[in-house]
Amino acid sequence: MFLPATSRLSRLAHLLGIPATTPHRSEQWAAAIGALIGISTVVMVTHALLGRHAAVFLVPSLGATAVLVFAAPHSLFAQPWSVVGGNVLSGLVGVACQQLIPEPTFAAAAAVGLAIVAMHAARCIHPPGGATALAAVIGGPDIHQLGFTYALVPVGLNCLLLIGVGIAYNYPFAWRRYPASLMRYVHDESVDHGILPDERQIQQVLEHLNVVVDVSPEELREVIEQSLLLARESGGGAPASTPLVIGGCYGSRRSGRHWSVREIVGLSGDGNDHRGTITYRIVEGKGRHRQGSCSRAEFEEWMGRQLRPRRQVRHH
């Protein structure tokens, strides 16, 4: 029995690990421009500090780090401790292997393997760290003469510069701030939070399953919550009427770069008159810190769900 062509393609994609979704084109360009700015900054600063002749001080593995910081800023592998700790530790391991193991082939293999062990032990897994360790062995005399200084300059310096650019570049984008700790998640008031696992419980499950997931437990909790909301909506149930109250926070229907959260600071009339006026301030997302006003009908057309700040959820 033959499967339809679409089913065969689907199974092949699953076998090859091809993602079913892809980021919006705007996200792709944001990542590309960020990496361009990040690497350009590293090159210029390194040349200014060490001279244009010092091309050896530009570690090739930094290109892979830039992909993580700007294309996957919430990846656990891209967080500052992983970037700095993973690369610096790998650099130290690579130098040690180059100096202690006379056979270059075995030294290169040992550098990568032991770098993984060191990163696991320090909880700073960073895939480009393998290339950093390898470069310490096969980088040639210019790298070898640096000794263990290689792990600090150029590796540590390059990492700090790239992290600084990553923080500054991603901060204006509320949905892709870097590092992930700067994200301000909001949670839907209509979800029964009593049935949702918290970050601690998710972490316990990950440890029990002994798997590596490239997002934080907090982001996994957000995925679970949004999935429950979609499941409820697709079940055919009409969404309940959302009350509009002073001090309430409401998220927009649109996501991505258009997403924002408004807090109501004033209501004219009893709040039920669609001709009444609502005054609000934007507390997160596009137009943050701005204030505005509109009719209740306009606000309801813009509004997606009532939300509550993450800092309140943590007390549950």
Image (tube, rainbow, N blue to C red):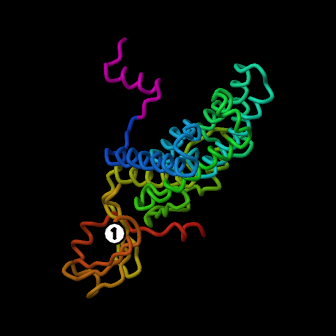
| The N terminus: image quadrant | top left
Q: Secondary structure at mark 1?
A: loop
Range of magenta residues = 1-19
Residue 208 placement (x, y as % from top left):
69, 42
Q: Residue furthest top?
A: 1
Image position of 85 with respect to 1: above or below: below
| Residue 36 magenta-highlighted | no
Tell me what residue is drawn at x 57 percent, y 41 percent: 54
Tell me what residue is drawn at x 48 percent, y 49 percent: 44
Residue 144 placement (x, y as % from top left):
70, 32
State the image quarter where residue 97 is shown: top right
Q: Identity of the amino acid at label 1?
A: Gly
Tell me what residue is drawn at x 74 percent, y 42 percent: 121
Q: Give the class, few, some or many, for how many residues have Cα within 10 Å of label 1's Cα (few <14, many ≥20).
A: some
Q: Name the residue carrying label 1.
A: 287
Q: How many marks?
A: 1
Visible in this render: residue 238? no
